[in-house]
Image (cartoon, rainbow, N blue to C red):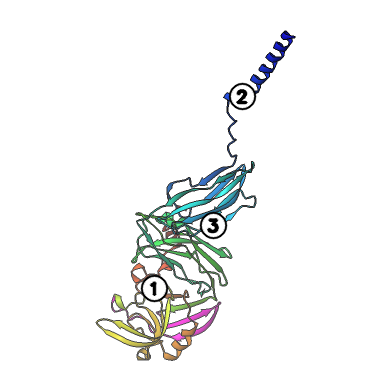
Amino acid sequence: MAVLAAVVFSVFALLLASCGSGGSGSEPEPAEPVAQVTLDPGAEATGVSPTAKISVAVRNGTIDEVALSNAAGKQVSGVLSADRREYTVTEPLGYDATYSWTGTAIGTDGKPVPIEGGFSTLAPTGTTPATLNIGDGQEVGIAAPIILKFTGPVPDKAAAEKALTVTTDPPTEGAWAWLPDDGGARAHWRPKSYWQPGTEVHVDAKLYGVALGGGAYGDGDLTTDFSIGRSQIVQADATTHRIRVVRDGGTVFDFAASYGEGDEARNVTRSGIHVVTEKYEDFLMSNPPFYENVRERWAVRISNNGEFIHANPESLAAQGSANVTNGCINLSPEDAAAYFPTARYGDPVEVTNTSIALSAADGDIYDWAVDWPTWASMSALDG
């Protein structure tokens, strides 16, 4: 009996030892969350373009909540994909600004993973604003160029031109050309030939975030939608001392006129295709030292060198028979008043048979004085 008791005690001791054998080990480590968060750009990135794609994506999980905020706490607009795996910012960011991500992703294992991190955008040495010459909804003449004018120089004109798009219906062949700076860089777009009446035009200048060279960047995007109205062409032949106004192929006016006397260069009405740019019922004209602040009626500007089509009763006796003006095209008060309301920005005025051609020296719109191959070569982009 003593032997049997000893055996039983030994077995019991072994069982106790086996139950306590794990006492020297440790509990298994909990599994890492499976969700993987990727920031674009990466955390702590610097010099980020404010128009670059900004997003956060999650693998092995979905986005529960997310926000991108600037240093003032203002949230940036964005959109979450249908599968909740990607969030993309939908508005441009600011220059020289810092942004921070906040939020949570939930993995397929049900465990949360924080969405966190930040980045900063590039800091330009300056920005260069620009303007477009034709406003939304405007109806213009068949010779109207599109003019993009910058407030300062644009060293990298190719980069700027890549950001410009002109869309037309019907399709219209045309090109951008960079003209000499006039207080700032300027690019003009014109069709190869006059616009087709009724053409609808959309211009997109996505300049914000574009490096223009010299450390300057585009100040903002520009856009406009306008249309081409009726065809009206002023045919102005200095040898006939008349002008004809041709609308949609038919003559609507045929007026006696007087052109520049031509006794010296400043008095020569320039030959070539001018463009109507503005008009005034009353305008004070000056041509020092010969006269100053002379009030003229029904003045339609056709060039920045001082050329107008306007009423002038003092040259009435010469109209239709002689050229006696200082370079403008003079009409009778009645004829000028009849033409004036029909004139529209962008109408061509085709002056012929004078001794000096319209050129860059005569103002900012001499676009049609440049032949098409030369014009196309003035683009900053090959082809």
Disc nearer the start of the sequence (2/3): 2
Q: Which residue is mark 2?
A: 22
44 relative to 362 in the view: left or right: right
SS at circle 3: loop
Give yes or no for residue 85 being in the magenta stretch. no
Q: For the residues labelled 3 and 1, say whether their Cβ atoms are less than 8 Å apart.
A: no
Q: Is residue 216 visible?
A: yes
Q: Residue 36: x percent and y percent?
A: 57, 41
Disc nearer the start of the sequence (3/1): 3
| Name of the residue lying farthest toward the front | 2
Q: Which residue is mark 1?
A: 271
What's the distance in space between the residues labelled 2 and 1, CA to CA? 105 Å
Other residues around mark 2 within 10 Å, as few (<14) / some (14–19) / many (≥20):
few
- The part of the image, by quadrant, that contains residue 187 is bottom left
Q: Which residue is mark 3?
A: 90
Other residues around mark 1 within 10 Å, as few (<14) / some (14–19) / many (≥20):
many
In the rendered structure, which amino acid carries the disc numbered 1?
Answer: Ser
354 relative to 198 in the view: left or right: left
Measuring 46% from the left and 78% from the top, which residue is drawn there?
A: 235
SS at circle 1: loop
